[in-house]
Image (cartoon, rainbow, N blue to C red):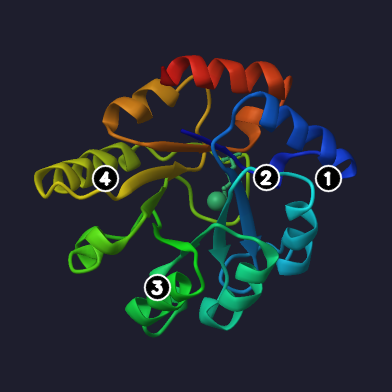
């Protein structure tokens, strides 16, 4: 599945990019929320997500890179987010916050930074809709893929398959047409791509991503 990150989209004509994603059959839209505190960059908040919601029906795969995400769960649910993914370091009670996300009718995910271990997921993995493996350090679009992510994807694939869990593996950061196959072969279910989709001809790039996924 493909989840283009709109961080790299054209915000002066976002309707056009939503249309391209719809016509290209994108499965999700990856929405990066950054607070300038947990990560050294600021993007936008739930009110903008709510406005985007009026422009497309593609499910929003919302990636929260913010401190204390539990304080914003309700707002993102109201804004129309479908999946809420959080970083374990940002909340004092990870399991409680994940339950709060589900109680608000959304699917939940946990994002792991390049230095984060898989072991912290052991007791919650089967209850997650997805695990987001970060293949860059969070904060900016357009960074290079960190190769050690491939090993982490393979290790997680093995754990999920051995236990027959349904949890999906999403990979985010530096994913481009050039390395997409390698990431899929490692075991990814969902590819996030920002600059890899929106740099150049987005419609063509989406078509090529989709062909690779067949
Ligand atoms: C990084 C974000 C990513 C980013 C991906 O912190 O979480 O979603 O937008 O952009 P690319 O694909 O350009 O690395
Ligand atoms: Zn992201």
Q: CA distance from mark 2 to mark 1?
A: 18 Å
> x%, y% of residue 176?
53, 27
Nearest the camera: 90 or 137? 90
Q: In the rendered view, would you say 124 is above or below 22?
A: below
Q: Residue furthest right?
A: 12
Ligand 1 lies in which image quarter?
Answer: top right
Q: Nearer the viewer, mark 2 or mark 3?
A: 2
Identified at 52% across, 80% down, the residue is 70
Question: Label 2 vs label 4: CA separation?
Answer: 32 Å
Pinpoint residue 156: horizontal percent, then vertical percent. Answer: 22, 47
Q: Are marks 1 and 4 in contact (CB under 8 Å)?
A: no
Residue 58 spot, x, y in % from top left: 63, 43
User: Quick one: label 2 or label 3, which is nearer the N terminus?
Assistant: 2
- Mark 3 or mark 1, which is nearer to you? 3
Q: Circle 1 sits on which residue?
A: 11
The numbered dot on residue 57 is 2
Find numbered disc 3 in the image and state the secondary structure of the residue it sits on: helix
Categorize mark 1 by other alpha carbons within 10 Å: few (<14), some (14-19), many (20+).
Answer: few
Density class for disc 4 (Cα within 10 Å; few <14, some 14-19, many ≥20) is: many
Tag 1 or tag 3, which sits nearer the N-term?
Answer: 1
SS label for mark 2: loop
Q: In the rendered image, which quarter is residue 37 located in?
A: bottom right
Q: Which mark identifies residue 152? A: 4
Look at mark 3 in the image and give the residue it sits on.
98
């Amino acid at each position: 599945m493909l989840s283009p990150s709109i961080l790299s989209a054209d915000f002066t004509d976002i309707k056009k990019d939503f249309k391209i994603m719809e016509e290209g059959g994108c499965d999700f839209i990856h929405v990066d929320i950054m607070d300038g505190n947990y990560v050294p960059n600021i993007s936008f908040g739930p009110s903008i997500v709510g406005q985007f919601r009026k422009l497309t029906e593609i499910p929003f795969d919302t990636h929260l890179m913010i401190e204390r995400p539990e304080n914003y769960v309700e707002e993102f649910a109201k804004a129309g987010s479908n999946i809420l993914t959080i970083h374990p370091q940002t909340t004092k009670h990870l399991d409680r916050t994940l339950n709060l996300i589900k109680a608000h009718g959304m699917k939940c995910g946990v994002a792991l930074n390049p230095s984060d271990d898989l072991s912290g997921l052991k007791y919650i993995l089967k209850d997650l809709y997805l695990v987001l493996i970060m293949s860059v350090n969070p904060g900016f679009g357009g960074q290079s893929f960190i190769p050690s992510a491939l090993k982490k994807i393979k290790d997680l694939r093995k754990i999920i398959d051995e236990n027959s869990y349904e949890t999906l593996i999403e990979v985010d950061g530096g994913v481009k047409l050039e390395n997409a196959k390698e990431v899929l072969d490692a075991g990814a279910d969902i590819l996030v791509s920002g600059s890899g989709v929106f740099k150049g001809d987005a419609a063509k790039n989406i078509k090529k991503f989709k062909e690779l996924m067949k």
